[in-house]
Structure formats: structure tokens, C-alpha cells
Amino acid sequence: MDAVMALCHFCEQHGPSIVFTCEKVKKAHNPSENIVNEQDSEVFTEPCSSAIDIGYATPYGSLDSLASNVTISSNRSSIKKADLCQACRSLPEGHQHFVSHDKDAGVIYRSMQHPNNPDVFRLVRHACVRSLSSEVCPGREGPIMFGDEQHGYVISFTFYVKDNYARGGQRWYSIICIMTDRVFLIQSWPFLVDCIGHIIEYLQMEADVVFKSESNEDTQSNSRPRARWSNVVTPRNFHQQRGDNSNARPLVQLTGNQDLYTYIHTAFTWIMRACRKRLKEQVTHGKITDEDLVRAEILARAKRSYSVMSMDDPNVAAASAELNSLSLVALKSPDEPTSPTRAIFTSLRQMREVLQPPLFKAIAWHLLLGNQVIWRGQDQALVSSALHILKDILPIGCVKMQINSDVYVNSYKANILGLNDKVAIPQHVQKQEFFILVDVVPKVSTTQKLNQYYPALFDMPQSPLSGIEFRMTSGCLIPEKVPAMLHKLEVALANDNLSNEVVKQCLICLKQEWMNKAKILYKFTKIDNRDKEDTSKLLQTVLNCSEEDFRLMKFWITGLSTQYKEELRRSALEA
């Protein structure tokens, strides 16, 4: 439900009553569609003059600037009204409603005594009774908020207007704004209370002038009017003390302004229009992550390298290929396919099932600690698909990947390497412990031998992973104690109750957790220059890390962004 604003009055005879309401009734998509008949309507050429004269303005702009495209019309057709007293009546006989056309937004606002919609009337009536009876501030005058999902949420501003003929010399009114969106209403509290306060100040100012004028006239004639009621009316005793209401006077008479409801309609219309325009929904992004910084730095570094390379340089092709490989891997979106050709490996869970848990654990262990992971095979699409899946285990800054390489590349250039099956691994690399080689080779089986003699029995389509096997070569054995991150990752992959998307989010959280620990370790050792003893205490008591976790964090420090490191150094110098 759109916002509805209303002026309410506590009548001495009828109790809480609705005096004037303003609501958005429809959108005018067709300019010819009007709620009122233009032949029977009067158009005011200066709809905002009364508001401008009193200086009605808010920090969000003047009423004149925001209502310049709003025209007001009043239907003069006859309508049957209920038997209301003068204090409960707003519009005179024959005056049905005010209508404003917001040409910019294509919205129509209408003000009248009571809403035509029974549901809206029920909500406004309920809010009216509560605003003038139970829901009041200490001292009864001031703004308050109340409501629920069933009856809507309301901001109510209760106030009094002076009257020589009323009980206690004053009459109680309230201006309410009701809507079903609680969050929007709370966010609009400062704006609405400020705007409604301006309206109330104007009404009380006009009423004070009339009150003083009548008091002066009574003093001069030595016949001061006697108020019919000597006590202030309250919601609890008005039923017992109500009687003749001949002293009831409408708000127009109390303020001495015959165009009062023209002003109120204009003000209500402006408030609802400005309140709708001042708040817009937008997506609020959090602080940029370190991986985003690394992506931007890799892209900038690649552009600088391209700009300084000469086209006559014989190594320009090799350098371009290397930069392309690094930048495209780092800047690759997570939503893109895992392989540029076809996704043979679709997730870490599938890879773990295909490779079997021991081999997958060995690959992940080497990868997390910064050792070189090499895949070699004839099917480069399969090798590329596997490497694109494995790189997601590491932060972007720790990934240096090359695929479809015809020569071996050292680990400082590519810690994730894809080779052709004809490429040999150098002897000095095979003697080291800091690498793992996975060879993708054809698997010769009895079925393949029978297929040579009975081809018609084996024409069924097969998976790209069928008919191959994976052979591991490594210079070291996997220890029993592995990094805590690897253990948590294996637990998540082995849990069949978790979907692949949940496992993906779990991996993101794990990477963020251990990247934060790597940041703490970097600041503690590189910026604060703490010794080994203090570092050991930090790992054991604060970070709760083992020796394997320490090796992981030392490698992950290399993946921190340059901007983050410079900010830490700058902060240390300023301190």
C-alpha cells in the first residue's frame, strides 16, 4: 500500500474522527485519463501560493520547486455527506475532493474527507483512533510511531490548536502518515517529522492570531466568551461528559484561512511525492577485497608490459603469450566455463571422485604449500579443464598458470603447469621434492582389446574421462598432518549433503579465513619485525596454527596485493 496522510481531530461529541485524507489513487498513463471531469472542475493556476507565503520549505527543497508540475483541481459535483458536526467536517457541501496530477511521474493524488476504498478507510480509521487515544507522547504533543503488519505502520504527530470556545481553550488534532512498509517508514522518520512539524507550526500560528484577536475583542467589550467546558477533554471521559456541541468550530474558522485545505492538500501531496523521490533502492557494495585488488594489479601490469615491448623484439610473441596466460587466468570470472573449450572437470568434488581421494589430496597439498603442480597429457582440453578447476583452491595472487606449453617452465614462473605429452621433465626437477606430476595416459583394458574384434558391441558413447588413467610422480610423501584448510576442504567435499554451490561458497570462506591469517603474519613479521620466538607464540596462541599451516601462510603472503602492503608500510611510518 502506498503512503496515506490524514488530518485527524478529537471531537468532543464524536471522539476521534478523520477530517482530511490524501492518497495516491492511480497512475495516469494516458494524459486524457483524469479522475475528475475537466468540464466540471476548476484548475488553480497557482496551486502552491499558500504554501510559499508561509515559507514552507525543507532541507530537501522548497514546495514551489518540487510541485511546479502539479496542478490542483476540485470537483464541484454534489455528494451526500454523513451527518457530521462542524468540527469534524473539512470540505464544504458540493466540494468532493482535490486532485493533483504529477506530470513528471504520471501519478495522481487525491484528497477528500474519507477514503473511498473500504480497506484504506479501515486502516486510516484505526490509526486515527490510536493516534488520539492510546498512542501519545508524554505531554500528548509530539511525534510517535506505532503499528503492525495487520493494521499498517504509522507516524503520528499530535498537536493542539487554540480555541476560545473549547475545553481548556484548545482542541486536539493529529497528522498521521500510514504505510505497510515499516523499513521505509523508519528511514523516512526524520524527513516526515520535519515536514509535518512545518505544517503544524503554520496551523498553530494562524490559530494563535485568531485566538488573540478574539481575546482582545472580548476584553474591549468586557464580555469575554465563556467556554462551555471548563475541563480538558480526555479519551476516558468524553463519553460521559459529551452533550451539546454547539460551540464546535471547524479548523478553517479557528485559523481564519478559507483556503486552508488547499494548502494542506498541497503540502500532503508534496510530502508524499518528495518522500518517494528522496529514497531510492541501490546495491551497496562492501569494501573491495584483496583478490579484486590483485586482479586490477595484474591487468595494469600486463598493459604496461604490452606498452613497453617493441614489435621488433624477437621475444615479443613469447612474452605476449606468457602475459596473456597470467592475466586471463587471474581476471577470469567465476561464472565463466572452467575450460575455454569444454568443461570435462566440472567441480572439485567430481575431480576428487575421478582421481580418487589419495591422489587428489596429494595434488591439493602441493598446491596449497606453493609446490609446482604439473599435468601432462595428449588431451590438452582435459589438462586445461583440470588446471582451471585446481586454481580455484588458491587465492588469485598465488596463481601463476600456463597451459598448453611445449616446454617446461620453472615454478617461479608457473606453479600450475600444463604440458604436452612429448615434453620431458628436467632431471634437476625430478630430483627435487617440491613438485608433483600427473600424467594422463590411455588405459589399456580387456574391453578395449575385445573392441578390436567385436566393434558393434562397443558403439555406445563414452565419457571423455573413460579409457584414461592418472599416474602420479612426486619427490616426497604426503605427511600425516596436513594444513587445517585442506582437512576442512576434504570434509566438505566428502559430505554428500552439501551441494556443489555450497562447497564453492565454503571454499571462498576458507580462502578468506586463511588469507586474513596470512595478512596478520605478514604485518607481524615484515612490518613489526618480530623475532621467531614472538612469531611462534603468535602461531600457537593467537592463530592456533601448526607447522604445516605456517608453510601455507608463508606461501599465501606472496599473493597479497601490492597496494595492501604499501598501506601497511605507510601506516607503520606514520605511527
Image: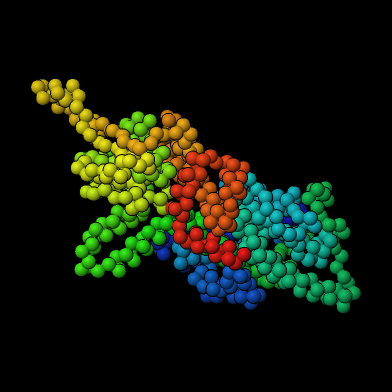
Mark count: 0
Q: x, y (%) of residue 256?
A: 71, 72
| Closest to the observer, 182 or 499 | 499
Q: Position of residue 454 (x, y in %)?
A: 10, 21
> From this viewpoint, which residue is outermost toward the right?
222
67 lies above or below 525:
below
Q: Residue 54: which quarter of the image?
A: bottom right
Q: Is residue 520 above or below residue 166?
A: above
Q: Is residue 49 above or below residue 135?
A: below
Q: Is residue 82 visible?
A: no
Q: Residue at 46% of width from left, 31% of height from top?
A: 480
Q: How is the image coloured?
A: rainbow
- Image quadrant holding the C terminus, namely bottom right
Q: Residue at x 35, y 33 (%)?
A: 359
Residue drawn at x 56%, y 74% is: 64
Q: Nearer the viewer, residue 531 or 523?
A: 531
Q: Horizontal placement of 468 versus 147: left or right?
A: left
Return the residue nearer the eye: 61 or 464.
464
Compare residues 148 and 18 and report the one nearer the observer.
148
View extreme (left): residue: 453
Residue 490 location, quadrant: top left
Q: Picture coordinates of residue 173 (x, y %)?
A: 72, 59
**Residue drawn at (32%, 65%) of the image:** 305
Q: Is residue 38 visible?
A: yes
Residue 284 relative to residue 235: left or right: left
Is 463 placed left or right of 453 in the picture? right
Instruction: Report x, y in % for residue 346.
Output: 32, 39
Q: Along the horizontal axis of the image, is 187 left or right of 503?
A: right
